[in-house]
Image (cartoon, rainbow, N blue to C red):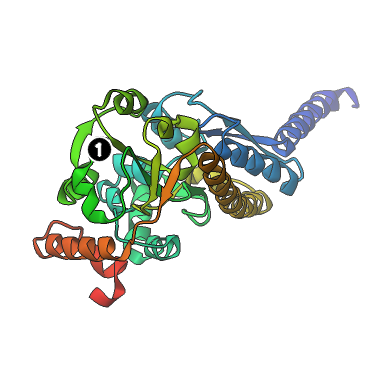
Amino acid sequence: MTNLHFPTLGRSLVAATLCFGLGATMASAETWRMATKQPSDSPEGIIYDFFAERVAELSGGDLTVDVYPNEQLGREDSILEQLELGTVNIYVEDSFFLQKWVPEIKWVAPHFLFQSREDWVEFTRSDLVQGWFETAEEVAGVRALGEPMAMVRGPYRVLISKEPVESYEDISNVELRMYPDELAIDVWQHLGADLQMLAWTETYQALQSGVVNAATSPAALVEAMKFYEQAPYITRTNEFWQGLPFMMNAAAFDALPEKDQQALLTAHEEAGAYSAELMAENAAGMQALLEERGVTFTDMPLEPLFETMADWYRERDAAGELPEGLLEAAIPSEG
């Protein structure tokens, strides 16, 4: 009689073993892959590593984030495909890359429309811009982690030139290195600059040879790129503001336990605060260091420049050349 129950008992033991093994697998730590363009020793790379460390700590080790800097997992087009598929869980870069799915997001950082970062961030929280992010999720299953613009890049924009730029009228004397962005080209041509289309890596030599006499840059990259060696005048312009959304595979996030979701959200919020502090320190340190090297920092009155550009945007809006509602979202008094 006992022998008749051996097969049943055996099956029960096998099932119990499989369930135990499955439970152990489900309980093991999950690893997310995070792709970035910047080197790990850059200011941005330091912040990404901080984020990963905090996720591990806050999740109690149940969720880890492996950071892949320097495009180790592929260039942008490849990363976007992997992000959709979920083989890459997070991609951190300027939101312009979302144009693959949301063409209107090219307007997320209009040139010379916001004098302060705070005003710009408020614009990115508008229904208009949030709708663009929602479209990215609907089309590609890609969602921003937390506040999209919490991570600071820049922290502000400057104009590096061979001659001082003391008012926006001086821009008409500038031969400016430019990149292939339609809005940037339109804006700088409107201001009277002569543009030369050049790769970022060609800019130093172009300044040296006289092909151009000026270039725009985030303040954080001025020292590293050494453009100041050929163009010793730096003018803060606040041309546009930059944030770095942590864009993630939405399905992967939704599948996580609530505590691990919260670990990601909290770590991201802390990384955003850290980025603001670190970028401000770097910008201040950069200015002090370069002034010791003979670089002149020019204070250009910005109010006339921004008033001129506000009129330009109004003209484009009246001509139907802006996304509907953009000017109202950017300048509430226009509504």
Decide which of 69, 142 is in the foreground and name it. Answer: 69
Q: Residue furthest left?
A: 319
Give the quarter of the figure containing the N terminus: top right
Q: Residue at x 84, y 28 (%)?
A: 5
Q: Is residue 117 left or right of residue 167?
A: right
Q: Height in image: 49 above or below 322?
A: above
- Decide if residue 155 is on the left or right side of residue 138: right
Q: Name the amino acid type tagged 1.
A: Leu
- Tell me the quarter of the image containing the C terminus: bottom left
* Residue assigned mark 1: 176
The front one of 77 and 180 is: 180
What SS does tag 1 mark?
Answer: strand
Q: Residue at x 25, y 55 (%)?
A: 168
- Residue 200 falls in image quadrant: top left
The x and y percentages for residue 204 are 36, 26
Label 1 CA crowd tier, 10 Å (few <14, some 14–19, many 20+): many
